[in-house]
Amino acid sequence: MLDRMKLKMTESLLDDFIKLFTDLNNNTRLTQNRGFTPNELSINRGGQDVINSISFGPNITAALKSGEVNIEGYRKGILMSELPKKVKMNMLRQLAQIEDRNITQKKGRQE
């Protein structure tokens, strides 16, 4: 996406952006949380992880399938993140499924 918008970011700038974006999301009051922020809900649950899973949306999935976004870069980011192990494994499984579909589609086109 950044390339499409002709924005250049170093890996450290991207890491800083992701941390700020995550902080913004975790401190934003949400209607679906009855006005609470994810951080407030986490505190109310005794510090338990609020996130059980994360699904890639259609835009990210399409970008990963098309090769517009590097799957390997995503994989590294997931592994280096501070997400709960269960969430990381779920996300890595999704990446593997997208990768498998890409390989299957490419093989089908070659035949």
Image (cartoon, helix red, strand yellow):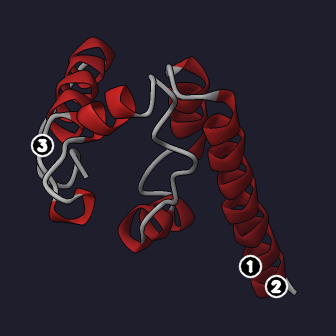
**Foreground pick, 17 / 30:** 30
In space, the residues marked 2 and 3 are separated at their CA atoms by 45 Å
- Give the percent coordinates (x, y) of residue 34: 19, 59
- Report the residue at 42% width, 57% height from top: 68
| Place of residue 71 in the rendered image (x, y in percent of width and height, measured from the top left) | 57, 45
Q: Residue 81, how many percent across, how many down? A: 50, 22
Residue type pointed to by label 3: Thr
Residue density around tag 3, few if under 14, some if 14–19, many if 20 or more, within 10 Å: some
Q: Is residue 43 left or right of residue 57?
A: left
Going 68% across and 48% down the picture, which residue do you hit?
A: 90
Label 2 near label 1: C-beta < 8 Å? yes
The residue located at (63%, 36%) in the rendering is 88
Q: Secondary structure at mark 3?
A: loop
What SS does tag 1 mark? helix
Residue ID for mark 2:
108
Between 89 and 53, the one lying in front of the other is 53
Q: Residues within 10 Å of mark 2 (few under 14, many from 20)?
A: few
| Quarter where residue 38 is shown | top left
Disc with the residue nearer the chain's start (1 vs 3): 3
- Amino acid on which the number 2 mark rests in the picture: Gly
| For residue 39, side relative to residue 85 (left or right) | left
Q: Which residue is mark 3?
A: 28
Mark number for residue 43? none
Question: Which of labels 2 and 3 is toward the front?
Answer: 3
Q: CA distance from mark 1 to mark 2?
A: 5 Å
Q: Which residue is mark 1?
A: 105
Residue with the most extreme top position: 12
Residue 93 in the image: state x and y as whole percent.
Answer: 74, 51
- Quadrant of the image for the C terminus? bottom right
As measured in the structure, the alpha-carbon distance from the residue carrying label 1 to the one carrying label 3 is 40 Å
